[in-house]
Amino acid sequence: MKPKKYISTLLNGIFILTVLLFVFDRLTSFEIKNQEIKSLTYFGLMVVTPMTLVWNLWTLKTRKWKIISSIPPTLALIGIIIIGPIKIMFSSGSWKTQTVLYQNGHLTFKKVEFQMQDVGALGYNKRTVEVIYLTDLFMIVSSVEKDIDERVEWIKVDKEVNELGLKFP
């Protein structure tokens, strides 16, 4: 394989992976738990998109392939401009568990948690959600049911985790 073709394949693969992770994290209940992966995804999207667009326009020989390969990065670049790079940067913080409120009695990886997200100078976002951990890196989040206290499968634990390391007086 020629070096240009190898670099094209690698760069386009990284671009596709980054866009998929970003779209899943932003638009579905699938979320990235690991801060390093989330930062790489969000900041990587803003760096890899223009790089991929320029690389594809510069290296590909035929006009047909230049047009075809420039469509996804161009759409991603338009999306970045519409969302706004600042908003993307502020939403790149992962949600950190502060307190595990309930534990599912049947499934140990299913919990109800109080979580906080550091948004830099803007402070913290807070939420209480039902979480299913796929791995230590990824989770599925859904809203908490109102009658959770009455449900038999949920055990109240109120376990302090404090992943953000905040100290309250």
Image (cartoon, rainbow, N blue to C red):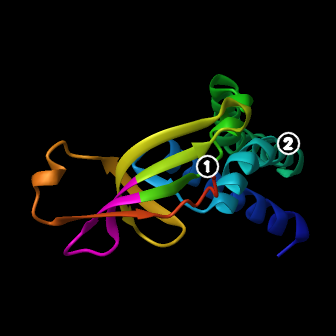
Query: Given this view, does label 1 or label 2 mark the residue nearer the observer?
Result: 1
Question: Quadrant of the rendered structure where residue 100 is?
Answer: bottom left
Could you tell me which residue is drawn at 18 percent across and 51 percent down?
Answer: 148
Disc 2 is placed on an element classified as helix
Q: In front: 31, or 93?
A: 93
Q: How many marks?
A: 2
Could you tell me which residue is drawn at 30 percent across and 75 percent down?
Answer: 108
Residue range (magenta)? 100-113
Q: Is residue 117 left or right of residue 41?
A: left
Quarter of the N terminus within the rendering: bottom right
Q: Which mark is residue 53?
A: none
Question: Quadrant of the rendered structure where residue 58 is?
Answer: top right
Expressed as whole percent of the image width and height from the top left, the position of residue 152 reads 10, 63
Q: Which mark is residue 54?
A: 2
Counting residues from the start of the chain, the first of labels 1 and 2 encountered is 1
Identify the residue position indicated by label 1 in the image: 19
Q: Is residue 41 visible?
A: yes
